[in-house]
Image (spheres, helix red, strand yellow):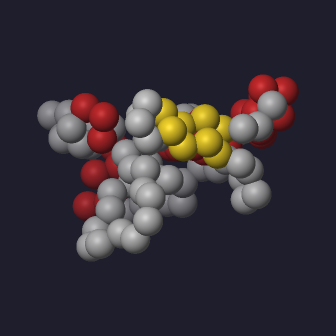
Amino acid sequence: ITDGRFSGASRGASVGHISPEAAEGGLIAFIENGDKIHIDIPNRSIELLVPDDEIAKRREKGVKPPKELTGYLKRYAKHVRNASVGAVFDD
């Protein structure tokens, strides 16, 4: 499960382009190792099997700020829109 892109071949079940992305505070930012996730392919849904109060605690901690970016990566991070709207430049 990722909010990023795939490259090359994948083996097994894969879920990509989760939105909203972790950088925007999407739920994927608060998943921790060992969390159970239910994937329902026929109904095109996924569910994080963690109690709401635990998610609230994780949200209070916030999302780690990204490290300082430079060059093209800095421009990309600042101006490219979310994959759910096409991952295109906003200008």
Can you give x and y, in whole percent of width and height, for residue 16 in the image?
Answer: 39, 50
Q: Is residue 33 left or right of residue 74?
A: right
Can you give x and y, in whole percent of width and height, for residue 52 in the image?
Answer: 78, 26
Q: Quadrant of residue 14?
A: bottom left
- Residue at image coords 44%, 41%: 41
Q: Quadrant of residue 61?
A: top right
Quarter in which the C terminus is drawn: top left
Res 24 seen here = no
The residue closer to the viewer here, 77 or 2, is 2
18 to 52, vertically: above or below: below
- Residue at image coords 40%, 71%: 11
Res 11 seen here = yes
Among all residues in the image, which is located at the extreme left? 91
Q: Is residue 26 left or right of residue 88?
A: right
Q: Is residue 71 left or right of residue 26?
A: left
Can you give x and y, in whole percent of width and height, for residue 27 in the image?
Answer: 60, 36
Q: Quadrant of residue 90?
A: top left
- Residue at image coords 73%, 59%: 33
- Residue at image coords 72%, 38%: 49
The residue closer to the viewer here, 50 or 63, is 50
69 to 50, vertically: above or below: below
Can you give x and y, in whole percent of width and height, for residue 76 in the image?
Answer: 28, 51
How many discs appear?
A: 0
